[in-house]
Image (tube, rainbow, N blue to C red):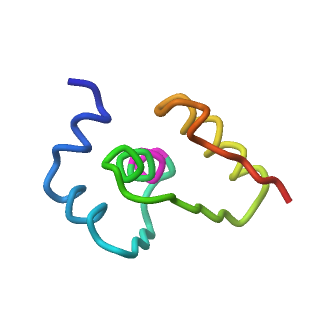
Amino acid sequence: MNILEFFLKNKKVKDITESSYIRVSDSCDGFNMMLIASDFMSGNSTLFVVLPTLYLAQRYYDEIVRIIYYDDVLFFPA
């Protein structure tokens, strides 16, 4: 089982990804990236992630395309 499969099977993560609105604060970027990927992989609709800086947005993009297929991730710089 890889880490993404673990996230998808975890009850607490499922509860979060099945809600209609997600807001996460005070967590590390790695967790946030896995949560975004898990939510996408669980079959929910399109996700739109807004980050405060271009640097952070690029970092998230670079890491998320390592988790899920790069054609499924779009990057819109400022």
- The boundaries of the magenta stretch are 30-34
Depicted 71 relative to depicted 55: above or below: above
72 lies above or below 50: above
Residue at 67 percent of width and 42 percent of height: 59
Residue 24 on the magenta segment: no
Q: Residue furthest top?
A: 1
Q: Is residue 31 magenta?
A: yes
**Dividing the image into 4 quarters, which one contains the N terminus?**
top left
Q: Is residue 30 above or below residue 52?
A: above
Q: Is residue 38 left or right of residue 64?
A: left
Q: Quadrant of the C terminus?
A: bottom right
Q: Residue at x 66, y 63 (%)?
A: 51
Percent x, y of residue 55: 77, 50
Q: Position of residue 65 (x, y in %)?
A: 57, 33
The percent position of residue 44, horizontal first and vertical second, equals 37, 57
Determine which quarter of the picture holds residue 72.
Answer: top right
Q: Is 52 on the left-hand or right-hand side of 66?
A: right
Residue in view at x 72 percent, y 45 percent: 58
Q: Nearer the viewer, residue 51 or 42?
A: 42
Single out the residue that lies furthest toward the right.
78
- Work out whether residue 61 or residue 47 is closer to the camera in this orientation and state it: 47
Which residue is pictured at 53% across the width and 28% down the height?
66
Q: Which secondary structure type mostly characterizes the magenta part of the structure?
A: helix
Label total for image: 0
Give left or right: position of 44 versus 16: right
Q: Position of residue 76 (x, y in %)?
A: 77, 53
